Image: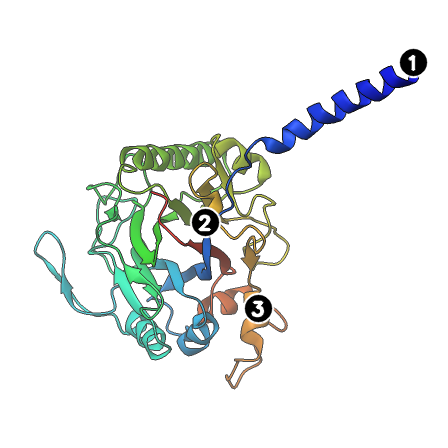
Amino acid sequence: MTRNIIVIILVVLFSKCNCCDDKPLPPPVQTNNDTITICSFNIMWLGSYTKKDDEALASMLQDYDIVVIQELVAPPFDGTYPDGSTYSSDAEAKEFFDAMEDVGFSYMLSNEDTGPNNEIHSGGSSTEWWVCFYNDDRVDVADDLPNGFLDADRSANPNYKRVPYAFGLRKDDLDIVLISVHLAPGDEDENVQYRAHELQTIFDWIDNNDAVEKDFIILGDMNIKDSEELEAVTPIGYLSLNDECRKTNTAEGTDKPYDQVIYSTTNTTDEIDINYDLEVVDLIESMRDKWEGDNPYPGDPYDHNLFKQYYSDHHPVVFKMIVPSSDDD
């Protein structure tokens, strides 16, 4: 009798456990087995340094689908500012653009520069233009998505040292808005607080512009000094692919995680290739075999002052996005 009771109890227990198997599992993410590769790269004073090795840099970048550049300080061609005044092509900037076009890139360029002072349209290192290079065989411009400067006032803006710029792009059913930033520099408390304000203003802008699209990615030189600061400025619902705060500056003796890629864990996790994570490309090693100068390569031994003129003081950072089989927003 006792033995029969034990058998009955076990049957009931296993029956209850098996009931859990009947609950529906979340559907797997459907993809078309394709990814796009995105690079964010602060090239120090691009358009100013005459030594810049444009062909070597373009050669390193040519296999990426999208390349977002910070610190372009001068325009690559003649044009007209929004206020009707004109600007002239800068020879150094044009050389880099020509090199990028030679390896297959098209580009989107902001319609003017932005900077922390009252005077912009300077063509010098006090202001900055925004540019996104893309392989048009792989990626399309999406002007129907939020795009352009995040604020109409590009000079001495109360919320930004440099007003960020949004680029809308599309790969099949993947729609993305890349917000390129170059936040306030400095390690003092007032600098840290200002960067926090800049980022919060960007998050607010996203909240006000996400009716059509949900996949916004903030990327670029955020001048984040350490993991403590990154944690403090990243709100709930967002994450950086450089949350380990890996070094992205080239200078010896300092380990600064300046360059970050922040995305929404609510809206964009399925499109981020988490397995790839983030690659910090070693610029010093990448340029070594491309050196063709008569003098010794400035990366061996490392000469920071010369290296940043030829290349940059930042390493590029790279991540991948997964193309879904259907658009989820």
**Which residue is at the front of the view, 69 or 107?**
107
Provide the secondary structure element on which disc 3 rests: helix
Provide the secondary structure element on which disc 1 rests: helix
Residue under numbered circle 2: 271
3D distance between C-alphas at marks 3 and 2:
31 Å
Q: Identify which amino acid the numbered label 2 is placed on.
A: Glu
**Which of marks 1 and 3 precedes in the sequence?**
1
Residue under numbered circle 1: 2
Q: Quadrant of the N terminus?
A: top right
Q: Identify which amino acid the numbered label 3 is placed on.
A: Ile
Provide the secondary structure element on which disc 2 rests: helix
**Which residue is at the front of the view, 286 or 84?**
286
**Which residue is at the front of the view, 43 or 241?**
241
Circle 2 Cα neighbour tier, 10 Å, few/some/many (<14 / 14–19 / ≥20) = many
Indicate left or right for 103 with 123 as reference.
right
Q: Identify which amino acid the numbered label 1 is placed on.
A: Thr
Residue 302 percent location from the top left of the image: 60, 68
Residue under numbered circle 3: 284
**Which of marks 2 and 1 precedes in the sequence?**
1
